[in-house]
Image (cartoon, rainbow, N blue to C red):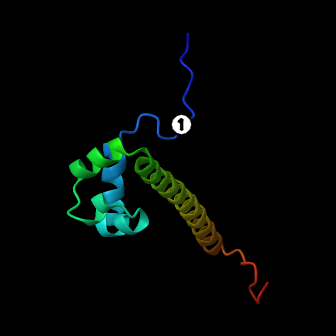
Amino acid sequence: MDEPISKDPLHGMTLKAILEDLVARHGWPELAERVPLRCFSHLPSVSSSLRFLRKTDWARAKVERLYLEDQRLMERNAKRNRRRAAMRTHRAEQEEAGEPQAGDADA
């Protein structure tokens, strides 16, 4: 039979991949600001942070929540950027065709 598809947005993601992505996107100083953990602010490293996060459920939950919020924000921004690009393309096509724009004084 078919296996049910997981509804967990972190399904298949390792904690290491999540942490490395957050560090690459924000850097250790900003990560320490967003999730105030000593392992992010004092001599941070992926390996020491992973050891702490694997032992501490509440800290891991905070990191996972930050990752999910970042993912949602990136998706929303990408969607908005695609929509804006489509609008620019549409306007450029109208200008090439000589169609008046909404708000033009000539129309």
Residue 97 vs 14, above or below: the answer is below
Instruction: Look at 55% across and 9% down and name the residue there.
Output: 1
Residue 40 vs 67, above or below: the answer is below
Q: Residue furthest right?
A: 107
x and y, in percent, of residue 59 in the image: 41, 51
Residue 18 vs 23, above or below: the answer is above
Instruction: Look at 47% across and 56% down and name the residue there.
Output: 66
Closer to the camera in the image, 15 or 6: 15
Say left or right for 20 vs 81.
Answer: left
Which image quadrant is residue 30 in? Answer: bottom left
Q: Residues within 10 Å of mark 1 (few under 14, many from 20)?
A: few
x and y, in percent, of residue 95 in the image: 63, 75
Closer to the camera in the image, 93 or 21: 21
- Identify the secondary structure beneath mark 1: loop
Closer to the camera in the image, 15 or 74: 15
x and y, in percent, of residue 27 in the image: 30, 65
Q: Residue furthest top?
A: 1
How many numbered circles are shown? 1
Q: Residue furthest bottom?
A: 105
Which image quadrant is residue 23 in? Answer: bottom left
Say left or right for 102 vs 21.
Answer: right
Label 1, on which residue?
Answer: 8
Query: Could you tell me the amino acid type at mark 1?
Result: Asp
Say left or right for 56 vs 28.
Answer: right
Closer to the camera in the image, 98 or 13: 13
Instruction: Look at 46% across and 53% down and name the residue there.
Output: 62
Which image quadrant is residue 97 in? Answer: bottom right
Q: Quadrant of the C terminus?
A: bottom right
